[in-house]
Amino acid sequence: MSVIERTHTVRDTTVRLHRDGSGEPFLFLHGASGLPGWIPFFEKLAEKFEVFVPEHPGFGDSDVPVWLRNVGDMALYYLDFLDDLGFRQVHLAGHSLGGWIAAELAVRNCSRVIDLTLIAPAGIRVKGVPSGDNFIWSPEELTRNLFYDPSLAERRLAEAPADQDADRELKNRYMAARLGWEPRWFNPALERWLHRINVPAYVLWGANDKLLPSAYADLWNERLPNAKVDIIEECGHLPQVEKTDIAVRKVLGFLNGR
């Protein structure tokens, strides 16, 4: 199968959309660094599901709508997005910022959500456990702090971005700041509404996450009514990249055994 890249328009907002596979639909919402490309994690999931990975409004080549002010707006956009695609239900997943968006979506309306997979999600905060600050880190510091394995960071740093990619990164950083600057990467109200998520939920975290500490997983586990939590050892903020095979196995185990 080959990845289909196209655009999709909802509410006069056009976004890039990657799609591959067949079976039940699986919608993945990316993190603050932007659309990650068709990584092996998606390839493996597409062997079992029809995987959809949209580029959020305001990121990369997607439109920047005037109505987009916060993560709540983004969550409501994705409810419209699901309505427009016409799926009765989907498996919903998100990483970091995308996990926060997915949780805000599910708090508002779970009727189209079969289950919820959150990979190192932003959105809530544990008092006394500070997060990292990607707005203060330099691009090199951010790259190094995303991984447990320094060789992976070195490999990424050695890749010279094309001019188009550099423009996308700048746009992504601007939109990430709009959504996550104040307060840093969480919504103080979200925690008290997580009980409304009445579908099976799975939280996956890297034990050595320097951006969003894995200690946050305990609070997600406490607040989500039907949650299961897994921690991957020797892994940073990107389990789906740094520990692809383990992450795929654990996510598929949850989806198949929910």
Image (cartoon, rainbow, N blue to C red):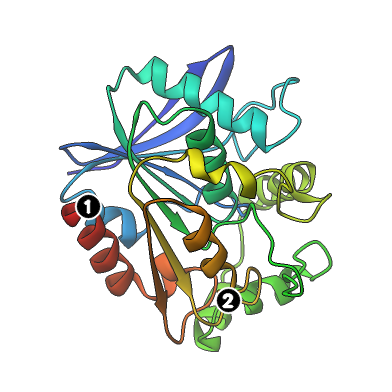
Q: Is residue 221 left or right of residue 228?
A: right
Q: Residue 42 at x, y = what percent?
A: 32, 53
- Nearest to the observer: residue 74 or residue 169: 74
Q: Residue at x 59, y 41 (%)?
A: 193
- Tell me: residue 26, above or below residue 64: below
Identify the residue at horizontal 57%, vertical 25% (top origin): 76
Q: CA distance from mark 2 to mark 1?
A: 26 Å
| Left or right of 255 in this view: 16 | right
- The picture places residue 89, in percent across and down from the top left corner, at 29, 28
x, y percent for residue 228: 36, 62
Up-down: is 193 above or below 125?
A: above
Q: Residue 232: x, y in percent?
A: 40, 78
**Considering only vertical position in the picture, is 65 above or below 155?**
above
Please tell me which residue is depicted at 52% across the width and 50% down the height of the picture.
99
Q: In the image, what residue type sits under mark 2?
A: Asp
Query: Which residue in the protein does label 1 denote?
Result: 258
Amino acid at the residue labelled 1: Arg
What residue sits right under mark 2 in the picture?
209
Mark 2 burial class by Cα count in 10 Å: few <14, some 14-19, many 20+? many
